[in-house]
């Protein structure tokens, strides 16, 4: 199984801050990594797919980068609507799909 | 506009079978893409359970292979999950979702299933 480790588990930030979340894979997954935003009681929302492709309708302050085993999600200027939990997710043809443990972005 | 909606019992007894259905509108499930089930125990992270390709082939999380079965009913544009021999550990919000470029681009609203006697 491929494990995904997200860090930090919680980040405290203010509106306007630059926020970076890291997702590390236990083995190389190429660029098959996605990022989701989830608010309490709601389904996750796709932000980034194939490591760096911005999903249609997602604000450009969200960006993704990385390949292989290390990936990052960056929010360039945190907005009030961005306080939520963020999940990474990978696909591997042999072991299937796994998610990271999540990173909660909270108000500082 | 693609929409997915989960339906099924909200309470299942231990050792029994959990059955959920996802009704898809706005896209024919046998046209393309894969259709999946993901769950989230209260206060925990997301877990992929399995998927069914548009051609009916299935793939499961190895942790649940043998207990989980996903099937489709193309005449009603639905796909379903059966999870046998449930325990309290299977209590979760269950989501159905569409898989595109190996990421989930459309999700249902989720349905809470509790396992309790």
Image: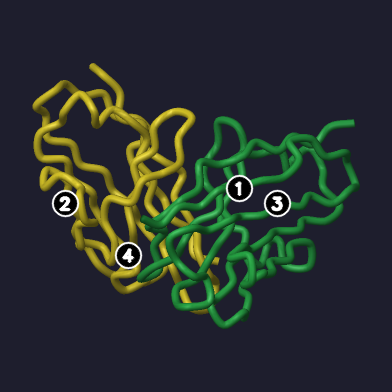
Chain colours: A yellow, B green
In this rendering, position of residue B18 left or right of residue A5:
right
In this rendering, position of residue B68 left or right of residue A47:
right
Query: Helix or strand or loop: what does disc 1 sit on?
Result: strand
Q: Quadrant of residue A61?
A: top left
Residue at image coords 33%, 58%: A34
Residue located beneath label 1 in the image: B6
Residue located beneath label 3 in the image: B20
Depicted A81 relative to depicted B41: above or below = above
Q: Is disc 1 in contact with disc 3, using a CB cutoff of under 8 Å?
A: yes
Q: CA distance from mark 3 to mark 4?
A: 35 Å
| Residue A26 appears in view | no
Residue at image coords 59%, 72%: B52
Q: CA distance from mark 2 to mark 4?
A: 17 Å
Total label count?
4
Residue located beneath label 2 in the image: A63
Say if labels 1 and 3 share a chain. yes
Q: Which chain is mark 2 on?
A: A
Front residue of B8 and A33: B8
Q: Is disc 3 in contact with disc 2, using a CB cutoff of under 8 Å?
A: no
Depicted B45 relative to depicted A10: above or below = below
Say if labels 3 and 2 share a chain. no
């Amino acid at each position: 199984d491929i494990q995904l480790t997200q860090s930090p588990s919680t980040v405290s930030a203010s509106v306007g801050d630059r926020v970076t979340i890291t997702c590390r894979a236990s083995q190389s997954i190429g660029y098959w990594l996605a990022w989701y935003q989830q608010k309490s009681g709601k389904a996750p929302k796709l932000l980034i797919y194939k490591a760096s492709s911005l999903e249609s309708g997602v604000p450009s302050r969200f960006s993704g980068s990385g390949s292989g085993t290390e990936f990052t999600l960056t929010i360039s200027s945190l907005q009030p609507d961005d306080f939520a939990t963020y999940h990474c997710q990978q696909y591997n043809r042999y072991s299937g799909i796994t998610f990271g443990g999540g990173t909660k972005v909270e108000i500082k | 506009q693609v929409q997915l909606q989960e339906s099924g019992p909200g309470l299942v007894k231990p050792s029994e079978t959990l059955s959920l259905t996802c009704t898809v509108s706005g896209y024919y499930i046998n046209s393309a893409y894969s259709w999946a089930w993901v769950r989230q125990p209260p206060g925990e992270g997301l877990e992929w359970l399995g998927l069914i390709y548009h051609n009916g082939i299935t793939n499961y999380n190895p942790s649940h292979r043998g207990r989980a079965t996903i099937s489709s009913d193309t005449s009603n544009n639905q796909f379903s999950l059966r999870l046998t021999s449930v325990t309290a550990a299977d209590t979760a919000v269950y989501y159905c979702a569409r898989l595109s470029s190996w990421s989930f681009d459309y999700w249902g609203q989720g349905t809470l299933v509790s396992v309790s006697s």
